Amino acid sequence: MVVAPSWAAAPPSGNYRVTHQYALGGSGGWDYLTLDPSTNHLFVARDNRVMVVDTKSGKVVKEIPGMKHAHGVALVPDLQRAYVTNGDANDVSVVDLKTLAVAGSIPVGGKDPDAIIYDSATSHVLTMNGDSNSISVIDPRLGKELQTIALAGNPEFATSDGHGNVYVNLEDKGELAHIDTRANAVKQTWSLSPCEGPTGLALDTVNQRLFSVCANGWLIVTDAGSGHQVARLPIGKAPDAVAYDARTHTVFSSSREGVLDVIHQVDKDHYSSAKAVPTLKSARTLALDPAAHEIFLVGAKSAVKGKPVSGFTMLVVEPH
């Protein structure tokens, strides 16, 4: 029996604001954020290391060294392992979640592994290889790459529905690819027009709606079954991440401009923009705690390309 979602039963999305700012410090750039809700640890990929932050205290728990242009972190709770992409080494570091120490590495055939996700349907880890237009399929239990999947364009972020379907934005094509992870093959590719440079991607698993955020300032909503574009809304330009809170029916997009866009899902095909939250210039990536309805972002007070980073900070955004 399929039960329609009860929109009225969800807590109101309300307005959002920055409630805490924590100085983290440290040099180097950063990329994706990944939250482990079981420990309240936020994993921040920071070039030559991974910074682990306690989201409740705002303190740095540990910095995991030995990375080579770290991009993203995927968690595999069953194995108590985290997997970190190293763009300059074309490999993935394996981290023990109990000790927060590197336990090994897995070479991949693709170049510049960037975004990384865990697909629970196959128990595989997938890396999006930015310089070779491919996905590497890793068996984390065996600790090796099984296969590569060729793509028609440059992969950015990806998301899994947990039922054998993975979706990935193709940044240079302005398209969205649908991957069958049981067959390790591309099923379909859909246009995201007028989107240019799609980056962040999130999924409403109940309603099968995909949210792509685009460099030219669009949020595109796609039906994950048909590939039909059902909605599009203007957002801040140069976003790099998006998240969907299933309980509040709210979409969040973080942009390099220092704005967190808040979009309310009226129903699966209709959306309205709420008041955007000023954050921090360069705070382009985020992580959502779906239980606490908190959004975590990081940015630097000074983040000019080619110059040292200063004032690296974690922001917490909450409803009020």
Image (cartoon, helix red, strand yellow):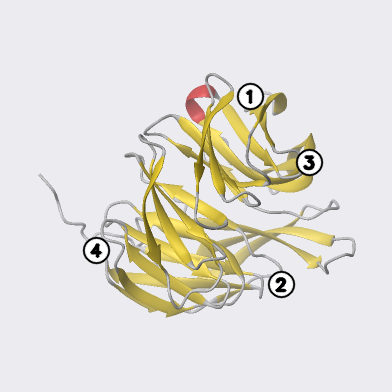
- Choose the circle earlier in sequence order: 1 or 2: 1
Q: Quadrant of the N terminus?
A: top left
| 9 and 313: which is toward the camera | 313
The label nearer to you, 3 versus 1, is: 3
Mark 4 belongs to which amino acid? Trp
Nearer the N terminus, badge 4 or badge 1? 4
- Residue drawn at (83%, 62%) of the image: 311
Front of the two marks 4 and 3:
3
Distance, label 1 to label 2, CA atoms, is 34 Å
Q: Residue furthest right?
A: 307
Front residue of 187/159: it is 187
Residue drawn at x 52%, y 31% as measured from the top left: 76
Question: Which residue is disc 2 drawn over?
Answer: 281
Quadrant of res 50: top right
Identify the mark at residue 98; answer none if there is no mark.
Answer: 1
Residue 253 is left or right of residue 94, and the answer is: left
Q: SS class of the residue under badge 1?
A: loop
Q: Earlier in the sequence, mark 2 or mark 3?
A: 3
The residue to which callout 4 is attached is 7
Is residue 123 shown left or right of residue 94? Answer: left
- Residue furthest to the left in view is 1
In front of the other: label 2 or label 4? 2
Which of the marked residues, 4 or 3, is nearer the chain's N terminus? 4
